[in-house]
């Protein structure tokens, strides 16, 4: 066999195997195995009939390897500290229908609030998708929802806090500047990082707002306000007595992070991520953070999961950018750096539970069910995309697809 013939056979095998979901490393092994078989046949110089039989056996071996590899990919989980594997394309479930009736006022469980494109009315759906409907009270026309509490019992629209029945609870002190406000895990207050005055150079303050009461200043002077920066509160939990604040520059990477004791304003820990910054997310109780930073000069990021208070490393994920935790802190939603595929991962084992492989649109946001392990994952939404698909994903990998152009408040 000439080198040119061998190259043609190799290319043909690559072309056929590339149509399967087999990882590139296994494809390469399959091609090498097949070509090696041909080399053995050539060296033996058997009669052409025997060579033909051996060639057919080689094809059978390769086919067995292909299907065996596909089966092993389906069953096997990744090793801890490694990159989540490329998932077999996830079949897209049929879109669910949501009720146009009024949402039951007696329903007491957590809900996801959302609007449907072209509508002005606010809707709610239970996290198991069994109950849905239009909220009885609605915000004023043109006042879009900018935040919801973890359980969906309250939301912010136009700088005003409403309950799920549309009753007005309070006006935020900085109306129209409420994007930085984060509901506490128990929904009783809002945490905000605000400058004393909105002038560059003003000192930053961490405040808590209880609807109907004057804001309480928790801490002051930990940073200097810049009008081209934002100061999101990543976590706010009265029960754990923690608040986590980050500063973002003109991009979306955090330059610095502070862990506060919510009751006293004491700074427990400060992290400086340098000029390159890091993508950071935190658990709702403020106990764990996930830091995603580029590896060297590549576009591949490594995510390190740490204790928020002391920085102790708990785990790592390669080629993964973390965006949000599940409510029990065990699962991470994020994206692969090279493909922008959204994924739900058990970060302790590295096992990938769900992926948007085979689905249109890149990662577009997340929100966690506060009482279970389900998460809402958006595809589209960003970069001028008109796509707004939302999947409610369970930890077993099953998913429910919301109606087209569903617009909840997701955390990117």
Image (tube, rainbow, N blue to C red):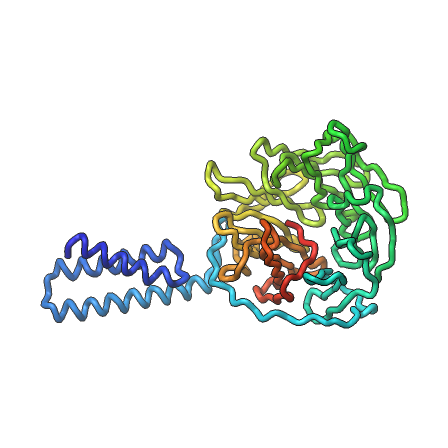
Numbered-mark total: 0
In the rendered image, the residue lying farthest to the top is: 201
Instruction: Give the side of residue 317 with respect to residue 42, left or right.
Output: right
Q: Position of residue 381 (x, y in %)?
A: 61, 54
Q: Is residue 240 visible?
A: no
Q: Above or below — where is 248 with respect to 124?
A: above
Q: Nearer the viewer, residue 50 or 348?
A: 50
* Residue 373 image-quadrant placement: bottom right
Q: Nearer the viewer, residue 241 or 223?
A: 223
Q: Position of residue 145 (x, y in %)?
A: 75, 54
Q: Position of residue 273 (x, y in %)?
A: 60, 34
* Residue found at x 42% / y 63%: 72
Q: Quadrant of the N terminus?
A: bottom left
* Residue 198 image-quadrant placement: top right
* Residue found at x 46% / y 57%: 86
Q: Above or below — where is 365 with respect to 261?
A: below
* Residue found at x 47% / y 36%: 296
Q: Position of residue 16 (x, y in %)?
A: 32, 63
Q: Nearer the viewer, residue 182 or 363?
A: 363
Instruction: Give the side of residue 190 with respect to residue 276, left or right.
Output: right
Q: Is residue 122 visible?
A: yes
* Residue found at x 68% / y 67%: 128
């Amino acid at each position: 066999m000439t080198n040119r013939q061998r190259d043609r056979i190799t290319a043909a095998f690559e072309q056929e195997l590339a149509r399967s979901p087999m990882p590139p490393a296994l494809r390469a092994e399959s091609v090498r195995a097949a070509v090696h078989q041909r080399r053995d046949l050539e060296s033996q110089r058997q009669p052409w009939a025997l060579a033909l039989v051996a060639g057919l056996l080689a094809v059978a071996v390769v086919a067995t390897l292909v299907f065996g590899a596909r089966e092993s990919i389906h069953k096997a989980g990744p090793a801890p500290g490694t990159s989540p594997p490329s998932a077999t394309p996830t079949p897209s479930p049929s879109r669910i229908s949501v009720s146009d009736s009024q949402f039951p006022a007696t329903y007491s469980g957590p809900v996801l609030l959302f609007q449907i494109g072209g509508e002005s009315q606010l809707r709610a759906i239970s996290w198991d998708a069994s109950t849905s409907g239009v909220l009885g009270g609605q915000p004023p026309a043109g006042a879009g929802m900018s935040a919801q509490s973890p359980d969906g019992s309250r939301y912010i629209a136009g700088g005003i806090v409403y309950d799920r029945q549309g009753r007005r609870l309070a006006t935020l002190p900085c109306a129209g500047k409420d994007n930085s406000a984060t509901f506490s895990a128990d929904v009783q207050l809002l945490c905000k990082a605000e400058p004393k005055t909105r002038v560059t150079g003003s000192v930053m303050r961490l405040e808590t707002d209880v609807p109907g009461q004057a804001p309480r200043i928790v801490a002051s002077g930990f940073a200097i306000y810049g009008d081209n920066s934002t100061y999101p509160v990543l976590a706010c939990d009265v029960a754990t007595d923690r608040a986590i604040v980050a500063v973002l520059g003109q991009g979306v990477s955090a330059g610095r992070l502070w862990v506060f004791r919510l009751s006293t304003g004491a700074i427990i820990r400060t992290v400086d991520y340098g000029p390159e910054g890091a993508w950071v997310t935190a658990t709702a109780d403020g106990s764990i953070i996930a830091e995603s930073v580029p590896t060297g000069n590549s576009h591949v990021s490594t995510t390190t999961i740490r204790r928020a208070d002391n920085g102790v490393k708990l785990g790592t994920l390669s080629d993964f950018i973390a965006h949000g935790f599940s409510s029990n802190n065990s699962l991470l939603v994020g994206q692969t750096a090279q493909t922008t595929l959204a994924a739900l991962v058990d970060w302790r084992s590295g096992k990938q539970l769900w992926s948007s492989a085979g689905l249109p649109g890149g990662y577009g946001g997340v929100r966690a069910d506060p009482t279970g392990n389900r998460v809402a994952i958006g595809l589209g939404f960003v970069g001028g995309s008109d796509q707004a698909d939302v999947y409610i994903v369970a930890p077993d990998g099953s998913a429910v697809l919301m109606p087209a152009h569903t617009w909840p408040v997701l955390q990117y």
